[in-house]
Image: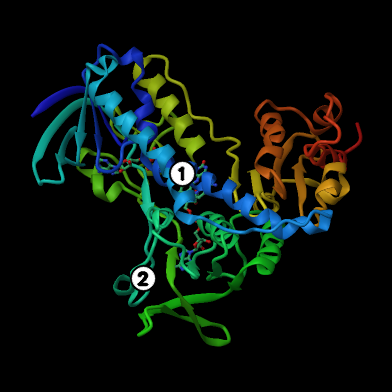
Amino acid sequence: MTHYDLVIIGTGSGNSILSPEFADWKTAIVERGTFGGTCLNVGCIPTKMFVHTADLAATPAKSSRYGVDEELTGVRWTDIRDRVFGRIDPIAAGGSTYRRQHADNGNVTVYDGTGRFTGMKELTVTGADGETRVLTADRFVLAAGSRPIVPSVAGLDEVGFQTSDTIMRLDQLPRRLGIIGSGFVAAEFAHVFSSFGVEVTLIARSGLLLRHEDTEIATRYTEVAQQQYDIRLNHDTVRAVRRDDGAVSLEMLSQSGTDELVVDEVLVAVGRRPNSDLLDPGVTGVEVDEAGRVVVDEYQQTAVDGIYALGDLSSKYQLKHVSNHEARVVQHNLLHPDDRIEADHRFVPSAVFSSPQIASVGLTEEEAREQGIRYVVGRAEYAGIAYGWAMEDTTGFAKILADPDTGLLLGAHVIGPQASTVIQPVIQAMSFGLTAPAMARGQYWIHPALPEIIENALLDLKLAEG
Ligand SMILES: Cc1cc2nc3c(=O)[nH]c(=O)nc-3n(C[C@H](O)[C@H](O)[C@H](O)COP(=O)(O)OP(=O)(O)OC[C@H]3O[C@@H](n4cnc5c(N)ncnc54)[C@H](O)[C@@H]3O)c2cc1C
Ligand SMILES: NC(=O)c1ccc[n+]([C@@H]2O[C@H](COP(=O)([O-])OP(=O)(O)OC[C@H]3O[C@@H](n4cnc5c(N)ncnc54)[C@H](O)[C@@H]3O)[C@@H](O)[C@H]2O)c1
């Protein structure tokens, strides 16, 4: 048994905690998978490298309307894949080597294996070879993340399936891809694989894709997606069968009866669950809610003094900018126990890097209504701004919700080109308490750039006089 000042479980955002200020702490970091966690290895970074490549591959099909005739003459899948992982894999390996070997980390021990609590502030780490080591510590940081949920579909295990962890490393592109799910992962991979020439079918249980978004945005996305992919709405996948020709048949139930889809690969994208079951934090007195999330207070501390948690393991926001923010809060609170800071979850933005992109911050119209919050809505279309004309955009728009009396912003939702970038000034305005009129007229808006859509939506708000 070895005792530490601090043990961190998980090398995603957890790895960023160990700054030089911890140089005289005896610390350990435990990792069961690839060093660097989800975002670097199988999440944000590789997906966006594929998305950018997909944007390029999709351009020729759209170019003739501008009088430019382009042709996509090839998609070299293994070159695309190897460029992405040729960049990422060395970063993960370098991060691991740095923690294990660099002089900066003389106080850090890296343990490869799965950590599981076996007593009060006692963690047993089991390596791939079955060898176990017991670590005790004064403080722990639980940063063990989440993993893809596999839906209970009869025969799925037997036919085999991909998740976001595996699909980016395929050896060859499938001809037909069936995606079970209709959230972030489904929308981004539909864009990627369809742009590379794969026949993509999305199977959604509900009547709307991306239904966590503002309904107007989700409705527009669903309409646009129906032009791009085969979409089966209100379909429940009930069985998967391997056919004699090697393809997979997915059997579905819908309101109108049964349906069948034949594909070469199946991507499962129905959400992610926190890895709390692997960690068994109840043994050390840490509470877990019914969704499997570790319960934390405003300081990111669990029910146990000195045990903090962050990121996908404990947060309802499964987003890297949130896990990074929470890691900074935990880092501060470990170093300054008498002057702790609170995590700020007031205005958490998100973006789906789909085609078209979607970005969102604050309340949706449905949430404002449910919560009885008074609001007005300002709208603007990409087709109504000069750069939108240049792009010939016909489907994108922005909507902004504001308090009619104070003019303070309540939420913003954008669907269209570069939505993930266009929304940033609204996030800033909400975070710093800027009102809509002050934001619209208190600064220049570069003409004719895409953020003019935000300026127009702000000017469209009908606020109370005075
Ligand atoms: C396909 C995909 C695309 C995404 N794209 C975006 C995006 O564009 N923008 C965005 O903001 N977010 C995105 N996300 C979400 C983002 O990746 C996560 O929110 C973020 O990485 C969570 O970080 P974390 O530190 O909480 O967990 P992780 O990075 O998952 O780290 C947890 C680590 O703990 C290890 N671990 C788990 N259990 C144990 C145990 N018992 N013992 C030892 N080690 C353990 C795991 O192996 C893992 O390495 C994406 C996610 C996916 C899946
Ligand atoms: N750009 C980004 O920031 C980004 C990209 C990818 C993933 N992520 C993060 O990863 C998380 C996981 O992504 P995801 O797309 O897997 O989850 P998600 O929660 O975004 O969407 C899952 C979808 O699957 C549906 N679903 C649930 N069970 C189902 C079942 N049995 N059959 C069919 N459909 C079912 C849900 O109704 C939901 O629409 C996201 O919530 C997000 O936080 C973020």
Q: Quadrant of the C terminus?
A: top right
Q: Quadrant of the N terminus?
A: top left
Q: Residue furthest bottom?
A: 257
Question: x and y percent of residue 381 in the render?
Answer: 82, 50
Residue under the point 54% across and 45% down = 48
Q: Secondary structure at mark 2?
A: loop
Question: x and y percent of residue 245 in the render?
Answer: 38, 83
Tell me the amino acid under the disc marked 2: Ser
- Badge 1 residue CB within 8 Å of ligand 1: no
Q: Residue furthest right?
A: 465
Residue under the point 75% across and 34% down = 408
Residue 461 in view here? no
Residue under the point 30% across and 24% down = 98
In this view, the residue in front, 341 or 372, is: 341
Rendered-image quarter of ligand 1: top left
- Badge 2 residue CB within 8 Å of ligand 2: yes
Q: Quadrant of residue 350?
A: top right
Residue 415 in view here? yes
Q: How is the image coloured?
A: rainbow
In this view, the residue in front, 161 or 437, is: 161
Left or right for 327, reference 97: right
Distance between mark 1 and mark 2 Cα atoms = 32 Å
In this view, the residue in front, 252 or 106, is: 106
Question: x and y percent of residue 341 in the render?
Answer: 46, 21
Where is 126 relative to 200, above or below? above
Q: What is the number of the mark on residue 152?
A: 2
Tell me the amino acid under the disc marked 1: Val
